Amino acid sequence: MEVMETRVGTELAERLEAAATLLEKTLGWLEERQRFLSGEVEKISATVETSRREEELAASLEEARRELVQLRAAGAGSGAAFPRAVETLRRTLPSATSEMLAKHGLQEGAVDVRTLDAALVGLSLEQRIAVKSQLRRAGAMA
């Protein structure tokens, strides 16, 4: 019986020693992990290099801005609401619009808004808007 008790005691001591070794390894791993997680973050810095394409785009944008300022100045100097390039656009109505107006007795000149509304009653909202915008572009309607 004493032999058995000694053997059980020895096995128990070996198991306790193995558990203690495993606990020490786990503790070492946890300490290392803690050092890694609580470590200081080094300063992060970066520089941005502008590419040649970005420089070309910036130059193009600046040139477009200068042209816009010149066009606005030319429009303001002439007293007109639009620059001269826009004023020289062709101002004619599409043939379908001219035909529709002619069927209702309207000429291509200045159009009375009330008469126009009466003529456009049979059209959908989108079509009425399109006809009115065409007439405005052509200068036939204010």
Image: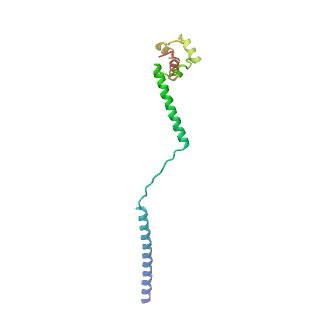
At which x and y percent is residue 48?
49, 47
Q: Work out whether residue 121 or residue 55 is closer to the camera in this orientation and state it.
A: 55
Name the residue located 44 percent from the left edge and 80 percent from the top edge.
14
Q: Height in image: 109 above or below 17?
A: above
Q: How many marks?
A: 0
The reply to whether residue 69 is in sight is: yes
Q: Residue furthest right?
A: 95
Name the residue located 48 percent from the left edge and 22 percent from the top edge.
75
Q: Height in image: 73 above or below 52?
A: above
Name the residue located 41 percent from the left edge and 60 percent from the top edge.
40
At which x and y percent is residue 89?
55, 20
At which x and y percent is residue 19?
43, 75
Q: Work out whether residue 98 or residue 140 is closer to the camera in this orientation and state it.
A: 140
At which x and y percent is residue 131?
52, 19
**Colouring style:** rainbow
Q: Height in image: 76 above or below 101?
A: below
In the picture, the quarter occupied by the N terminus is: bottom left
Kindly indicate the quadrant of the structure image that contains residue 34. bottom left
Q: Residue furthest bottom?
A: 2
Q: Height in image: 63 above or below 91?
A: below
The reply to whether residue 1 is in sight is: no
